[in-house]
Image: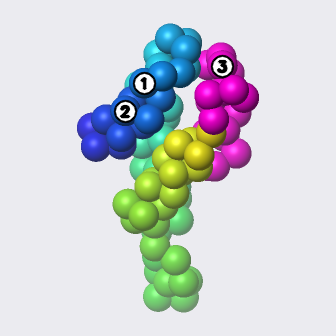
Amino acid sequence: MIFSKIVRAFVGGFSDAVSGAIAGIVASTQVVYYGVAQKLKPTPSKSHYTFNLRDISKIFQGVCSSDQKSTQQAVDVVRIWVHEN
């Protein structure tokens, strides 16, 4: 809910297609995060990285770095999201 509100506030001036894609992007980010967290659990032999909320925030920082001129359709914001993931 936090990231949804942050990104919705950022894309408030963007097109309706971009604004409409935000709910799907937030939900998909959660799916990716939980999938990675399940597959890459730290073990005593490989405890070098633990995924946390900071990783999710970096994805949305990248999405929020887009500009209105180059992000006019939903596919544009999805491409940015895929790149940040």
Where disc 1 sits, the SS reads helix
Q: Confirm whether residue 27 shows in the render.
A: no
Q: Earlier in the sequence, mark 2 or mark 3?
A: 2
Choose between 43 and 52: the one closer to the eye.
52
Give amino acid for label 1. Answer: Gly
Tell me what residue is drawn at x 42 percent, y 64 percent. Answer: 54
Mark 1–mark 2 Cα distance, whole angstroms, equals 5 Å
Q: Is residue 48 left or right of residue 30?
A: right
The residue drawn where x is 48% and y is 22% is 13
Distance (Cα) linking label 2 and label 3: 16 Å
Determine crowd level at label 1: few under 14, some 14-19, many 20+ residues with C-alpha closer than 10 A: few
In the displayed structure, 79 sits above or below 32; it is: above
Q: What residue type is labelled 3?
A: Gln
Q: Residues within 10 Å of mark 2 (few under 14, many from 20)?
A: few
- Residue drawn at x 48%, y 61% is 55
Q: On the image, numbered disc 1 is attached to which residue?
A: 12
Position of the N terminus, as image quadrant, is top left
Residue 80: image x %, image y %?
A: 66, 38
Q: Give the SS element for disc 3.
A: loop
Residue of label 2: 9
Left or right for 43, reference 6 = right
* Label 3 packing within 10 angstroms: few (<14), some (14-19), many (20+): some
Work out whether residue 29 or residue 60 is closer to the camera in this orientation and state it. 60
Query: Considering only vertical position in the picture, is 6 above or below 20?
Result: below
Q: Do the residues labelled 1 and 2 touch (CB within 8 Å)?
A: yes
Residue 56, can we see it? yes
Q: Name the residue under label 3.
A: 72
Q: Can you give x and y, in whole percent of width and height, for residue 49 in the image? A: 52, 77
Numbered range of the magenta stretch: 67-85
Question: Which residue is the extreme one toward the left?
Answer: 1
Task: Give amino acid for label 2.
Answer: Ala
Instruction: Identify which residue, 47 or 13, lies in the foreground.
Output: 13
